[in-house]
Amino acid sequence: MPELPEVETIRRGLADRIVGKTISQVEVRLPKMVKSSSPDFVRELEGNAFHSVDRQGKLLIFNLAHSADLSMLLHLKMTGQLIYRHGDEQIAGGHPWPSYNEELPNSYSHIIFTFESGARLFFNDQRQFGYVKLVDQTAVEKEKSRYGIEPLTPAFTRAAFFAVLDNRRTALKALLLNQQLLSGIGNIYADEICFYAGVRPDRKVDSLSILEKNVLFDACQVIIATAVRHRGTTISDYADSSGRRGNYSDFLKVYGRAGQTCLRCGGTIVKTKVAGRGTHFCESCQG
Ligand SMILES: [Zn+2]
């Protein structure tokens, strides 16, 4: 599943290209992907434009220019991908399979936005858990309120982070993944945050010292900021035809490195399951 840095990268890429561009056609090939009225969805969007693209956690919020109260919410969930193409230019994000470089539309292209400029935006989803929906601002605010504090935003203060950790008996990783408490951190970055902080992902939150909590707070900010700067780990960008990946993958210290040498202490990275998810950490330097 794409995490905050990947979704932020696609948000920035799309905002630069589609804001203010008239949408000439919306093709809904799989109506169940539209979680609001499908005919209304098409009718509102065709001839309209987006005036901005926001994000809350992993949720993309496309605000409509000519229906001030309406926004289109889009969630990629497990296997969603967004591919924008205009001439030779391509930006793509979300799940890396099928390849971003396939001919489009393919059998996973469920919603297709065509802009007057000729640009097209494909919402592909192999497993079809992703969705779009058209909602008013009250619903946008309600949706946003379901998300916890997010690294790199003003609400993510040390005090707020400590309050989230207070009296929790769950495993640290489960808490990091809990979108109602902390927004935008998924499996990859949860492991990297724990490694940065030198804390095992299976530690019970109420066993953490003040020092460890402080380092975890810093870790959330540093890891997410660095990943956003490097455009995440699974994002291709600016059409190189190879579907180049976001280059944060080169910086991963534990995720995907099971059996390899720990870059900090020379120990071995192990892979276990914590909170039901494949989890990577160093048994030697994470306590
Ligand atoms: Zn180590």
Image (cartoon, rainbow, N blue to C red):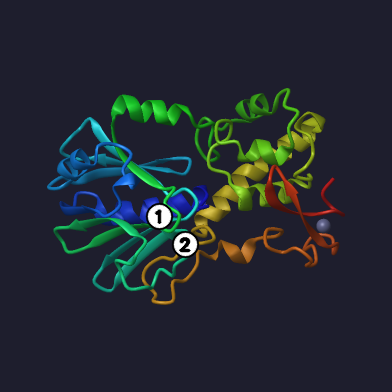
Q: Nearer the viewer, residue 29 or 146?
A: 29
Above or below, 241 relative to 10:
below
- Residue at 34% x, 64% y is 107
Question: Which picture quadrant has residue 139?
Answer: top left
Compared with residue 253, is residue 212 higher up or lower down, i.e. above or below? above
- The kind of secondary structure element at disc 1 is helix
- Give the left or right position of residue 90, taking residue 40 as reference: right
Give coordinates of residue 85: x percent, y percent. Answer: 28, 66
For marks 2 and 1, the one nearer the N-term is 1
Q: Circle 2 sits in a helix, a strand or a loop, which is it?
A: loop
Percent of width and height locating residue 178: 60, 36
Residue at the (62%, 49%) spot, across then down: 187
Numbered mark located on residue 10 in the image: 1
Which quadrant of the figure shows ligand 1?
bottom right
Type of amino acid under label 1: Ile
In the image, taking residue 271 as reference, residue 233 lies left or right, namely left
